[in-house]
């Protein structure tokens, strides 16, 4: 059986991972010429926008063979604004190559990625790229990798002539390897203590790398090709092959969705177990399959455990769906977006087309979080620019963005109740609805009335409307951690005239419950009261010790709270918290105040109650907080 390895290439933006992918494909004979990121001719950056901007935006799959192993290589974005695309890929990998620039060294995004790889125990090789560039410092970067990413590193080569076009790599296991390996192997430790040579040292490195105990470090240049054959051989030797029982129950995960030429939905899946054939039902009928081979997707009749495949026919599938038996693993590896902006069409006539386009884009990236009023979730300004260009180029819709704002949440702070009865209190709907809201764990809906007291469809209408209405609380933010209980229910049974004519004016419908529920729910929520919470990021800042005094008052103006400050040699490591709204200002400030030597890492931590002026979000519904306005909009009368 063919040995298969699903490999991720990850890096901080501009470290050279897409160029490395091109070089690996060329070395394997898949392409005749190495594509250029600058020229927009790379194989994996297939989107016109990717080629023009010179960055990877969407994950791409390409395959090559090395050392008897078929490698499905997944190239991922490096810019932090597209971290969601990386997250979707991590769950399908057998191993990874983390690319680090020999010039810029270990950067903030590099550290975020390595933490995720180590937490998920994904065997990882490190490739120190750009050894031919001026300013390359491979030995210093190796020390930084050990200090900032993981101490368990083993150098698999030595660079000669670093910083010049003629730089090349001598394959050799670096000094200190035995000491690192001895920490994880008693036999190696015994040989080291006795002063004996360790037999089969390379095999020991391979065994420990496959179980994530050590991380082999390779050196080279994706531009000149130096060191790339050694890396390719290391991928086959040091990373584990895919596993899984092809005869077991079907288990696979969707990590990408795209549209084919005819508009059909195509799912990219990783098979963990079982075998899927054309015409199988999952639960929709599979109409086509393709696996990746030597740079192309090749149609086939079946895909088996361990493979990555394209699947046609699953029109209802979404990114993240686990088909069949879900594989083991955790959910989100990175924080959700904490920013949002409203997208508006430049031409009013394009409003409908914009909604269709955003819906299609949300299929490709669920964390866009399309909501009422054209609101989309964002990680940063670059993502906004890419979204704007994508809408124009792929869908012909020119758009503008309103100001980017921080995404807040609302939580109930007390218990509130409200009820509307049929035929009283100015209730124009043929429905009785009573609701109680109170703090809870997540959003829950329960019945405090008998299930048989009215048709099931009416209860379902109330629950669905409750969950939809909680998308906008008293201040316009999504309400979370809210327990809703239905306390009153009533309806008028179906009425008909002679000859069986249905009389809607005297018969309750699900629509009555859908229209009444927002009024009752927001009234109960107003009675309970809500607290608005904004996202808070945890930060780690490494700065030269002599600049901390000047930086501290600036941090205070940005509402950053220092939790600890620890001197480490010539630098000081500061940890603390900062509101998400001030993160971008913080990031812009650090280089200028630290002579460019400061290293700042931030990550979402938690939500905390807003201090000071409570931010309000414009409503995009019929505003059930204003009874007269709401009734005018939904019934055309103010009862």
Image (cartoon, rainbow, N blue to C red):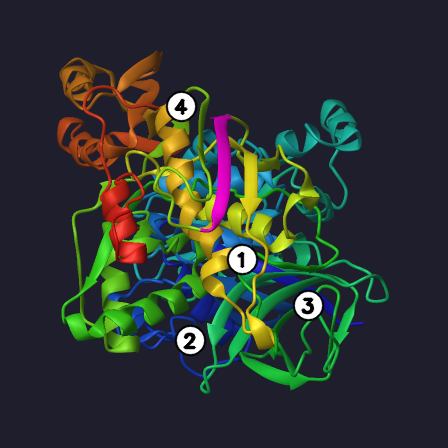
Disc 2 is placed on an element classified as: loop
Confirm whether residue 65 shows in the render.
Answer: yes
Q: Residue furthest right?
A: 247
In whole angstroms, how far apart are the C-alphas of marks 3 and 2?
Answer: 21 Å
The mark that comes first in sequence, 3 or 1, is 1
Labelled disc at residue 8: 1
In front of the other: 503 or 397: 503
Classed neighbour count for the residue bearing mark 1: other residues with Cα under 10 Å, few (<14), some (14–19), many (≥20)? many
Q: Which residue is mark 2?
A: 43
Labelled disc at residue 528: 4
Magenta span of residues? 430-438
Image marks 3 and 2: residues in contact by CB distance under 8 Å: no
Classed neighbour count for the residue bearing mark 2: other residues with Cα under 10 Å, few (<14), some (14–19), many (≥20)? many
Q: Residue at x 64, y 63 (%)?
A: 270
Relative to 490, say whether 170 is above or below. Answer: below
Between circles 3 and 1, the one closer to the viewer is 3
């Amino acid at each position: 059986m063919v040995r298969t390895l699903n490999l991720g290439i990850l890096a901080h933006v501009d470290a050279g991972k897409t160029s490395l992918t091109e070089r690996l494909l060329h070395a394997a004979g898949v392409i005749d010429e190495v594509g250029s990121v600058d020229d927009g001719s790379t194989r994996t950056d297939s989107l016109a926008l990717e080629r023009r901007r010179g960055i990877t935006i969407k994950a791409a799959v390409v395959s090559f063979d090395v050392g008897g192993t078929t490698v499905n290589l997944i190239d991922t974005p490096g810019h932090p604004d597209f971290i969601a695309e990386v997250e979707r890929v991590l769950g399908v990998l057998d191993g990874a190559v983390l690319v680090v620039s020999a010039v810029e060294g270990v950067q903030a995004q590099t550290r975020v990625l390595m933490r995720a790889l180590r937490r998920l125990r994904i065997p990882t090789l490190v490739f120190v790229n750009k050894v031919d560039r001026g300013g390359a410092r491979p030995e210093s970067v190796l020390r930084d990798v050990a200090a900032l990413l993981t101490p368990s590193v083993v150098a698999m080569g030595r660079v000669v002539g670093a910083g010049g076009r003629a730089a090349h790599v001598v394959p050799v296991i670096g000094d200190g390897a035995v000491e690192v390996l001895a920490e994880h192997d008693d036999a190696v430790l015994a040989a080291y203590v006795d002063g004996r040579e360790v037999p089969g040292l390379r095999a020991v490195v391979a065994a420990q790398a496959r179980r994530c105990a050590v991380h082999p470090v390779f050196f080279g240049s994706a531009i000149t090709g130096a060191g790339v054959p050694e890396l390719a051989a290391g991928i086959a030797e040091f990373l584990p092959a895919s596993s899984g029982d092809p005869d077991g129950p079907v288990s696979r995960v969707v990590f990408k969705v795209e549209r084919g030429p005819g508009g059909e939905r195509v799912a990219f899946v990783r098979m963990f177990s079982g075998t899927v054939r054309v015409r199988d039902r999952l639960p929709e009928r599979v109409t086509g399959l393709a696996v990746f081979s030597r740079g192309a997707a090749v149609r086939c009749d079946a895909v088996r455990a361990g493979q990555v495949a394209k699947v046609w026919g699953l029109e209802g599938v979404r990114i993240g769906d686990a088909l069949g038996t879900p594989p083991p693993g955790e959910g989100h590896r990175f924080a959700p977006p904490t920013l949002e902006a409203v997208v508006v069409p430049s031409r009013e006539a394009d409003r409908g087309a914009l909604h269709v386009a955003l819906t299609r884009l949300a299929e490709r990236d669920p964390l866009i979080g399309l909501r009422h009023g054209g609101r989309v979730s964002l990680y940063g300004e670059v993502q906004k620019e890419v979204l704007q260009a994508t809408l124009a180029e792929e869908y012909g819709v020119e758009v503008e963005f309103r100001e980017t704002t921080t995404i807040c949440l609302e939580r109930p702070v007390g218990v509130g109740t409200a009820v509307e009865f049929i035929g009283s209190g100015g209730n124009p709907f043929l429905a009785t609805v009573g609701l109680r809201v109170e703090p809870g764990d997540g959003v829950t809906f329960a019945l405090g009335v008998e299930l048989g007291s009215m048709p099931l469809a009416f209860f379902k209408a109330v629950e669905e409307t409750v969950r939809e209405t909680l998308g906008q609380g008293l201040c316009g933010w999504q309400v979370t951690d809210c327990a809703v209980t239905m306390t009153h229910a009533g309806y008028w049974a179906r009425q008909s005239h002679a000859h069986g004519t249905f009389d809607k004016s005297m018969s309750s419908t699900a629509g009555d419950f859908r229209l009444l529920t927002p009024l009752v729910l927001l009234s109960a929520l107003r009675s309970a009261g809500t607290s608005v919470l904004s996202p808070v990021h945890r930060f780690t800042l490494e700065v030269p010790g002599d600049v901390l005094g000047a930086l501290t008052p600036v941090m205070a103006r940005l509402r950053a709270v220092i939790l600890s400050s620890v001197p480490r040699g010539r630098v000081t490591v500061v940890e603390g918290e900062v509101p998400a709204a001030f993160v971008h200002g913080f990031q812009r400030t650090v280089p200028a105040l630290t002579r460019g030597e400061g290293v700042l890492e931030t990550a979402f931590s938690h939500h905390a109650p807003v201090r000071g002026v409570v931010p309000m979000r414009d409503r995009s519904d019929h505003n059930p907080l204003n009874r007269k306005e709401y009734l005018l909009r939904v019934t055309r009368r103010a009862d």
